Every structure is written in C-alpha cells, then in structure tokens.
Amino acid sequence: MKLSPKSRRNISRIVPYAVIWLLISWVIIISEVGLTMNQNLHPKTDISFTIPVLIFVNLANAIVGFLVGTLEVVYFEKILRTAVQNKDFIQNCHIPRTIYRGHTSFSSNSPFD
C-alpha cells in the first residue's frame, strides 16, 4: 500500500507527539518507582508495577499521543490557519499588551511606549 505524500508528511508530524508522550510517561514511571522503591504500601488501592501493567501504560500513552498528534496536525491546524488568515488571531494578540500597558501607564519607561 502506497501512501500519498500528504499522508506521509502528516504521519511524520504526528509520530513525534506519540514519542513525546511515551518519553514523558517513562520519566514519570521511573520517578514513581524510584520514590516508592517499588513497594506497594497500600495493596488494596495501589497498582503494582508489573510487566503487563508497564506494557499497558506504554501502549495507552502512545495511543493518546497519536490521538493528540492527529488532533493537532489535522484538526487544530485548520482552525489556526483560518483564524490567522481572517486576522482574528492576530487582532486578539494585543490583549496582553493592553493589559500590561494598563498596569504600567504611570511609568514612562514602558517597553510598549
């Protein structure tokens, strides 16, 4: 099965999201195992880190990463592109500047003056 160039580009833009989610989950898992020293102090409520649990956690995080990446690349990109083209996004970017200017209106050395 041959993929179109657009599909290959989208996949290459989605995969980093899954990798980032996976790497962050590894950091969290390693820190939790290190902090608890792999002891299950409350066996009725705590989840023990076993191989099946770790496999499930890695698969779940990779799937969530792919879903987030797909939403970012396919759906939100279109929304942001139309917002920028309509200049709604650019016109709304002055709000923090106005808030900042409002708080510093008494100083004469404001960076926005």
Image (cartoon, rainbow, N blue to C red):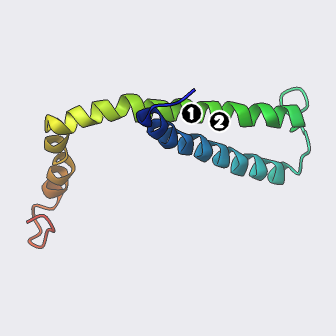
Q: Mark 2 points at which residue?
A: 62
| Numbered disc 2: secondary structure | helix
Tell me, for residue 34, which label it has, or none: none
Locate the N terminus by quadrant. Answer: top right
30 relative to 79, above or below: below
The residue lying furthest to the bottom in this view is 109
Rendering coords of residue 43 (x, y %) = 91, 31
Q: Nearer the viewer, residue 76 or 102?
A: 76
Rendering coords of residue 52 (x, y %) = 86, 31
The residue lying furthest to the front in this view is 2
Q: Residue at x 74, y 34 (%)?
A: 57
Mark yes or no: residue 48 visible. no
Tell me, for residue 66, which label it has, or none: 1
**Number of numbered discs:** 2
Mark yes or no: residue 2 visible. yes
Locate the C terminus by quadrant. Answer: bottom left
Alpha carbons under labels 1 and 2: distance apart: 6 Å
Rendering coords of residue 4 (x, y %) = 45, 31
Circles 1 and 2: CB atoms closer than 8 Å: yes
Amino acid at dot 2: Ala
Task: Specify few, some or many for label 1: CA neighbours under 10 Å numbering under 14, 14-19, or 20 or more.
Answer: many
Q: Which residue is drawn at 18% across and 46% down?
A: 95
| Numbered disc 1: secondary structure | helix
Amino acid at dot 1: Phe
Name the image quarter holding residue 53: top right
Q: Residue at x 88, y 37 (%)?
A: 51
Is 83 placed left or right of 29 in the picture?
Answer: left
Task: Specify few, some or many for label 2: CA neighbours under 10 Å numbering under 14, 14-19, or 20 or more.
Answer: many
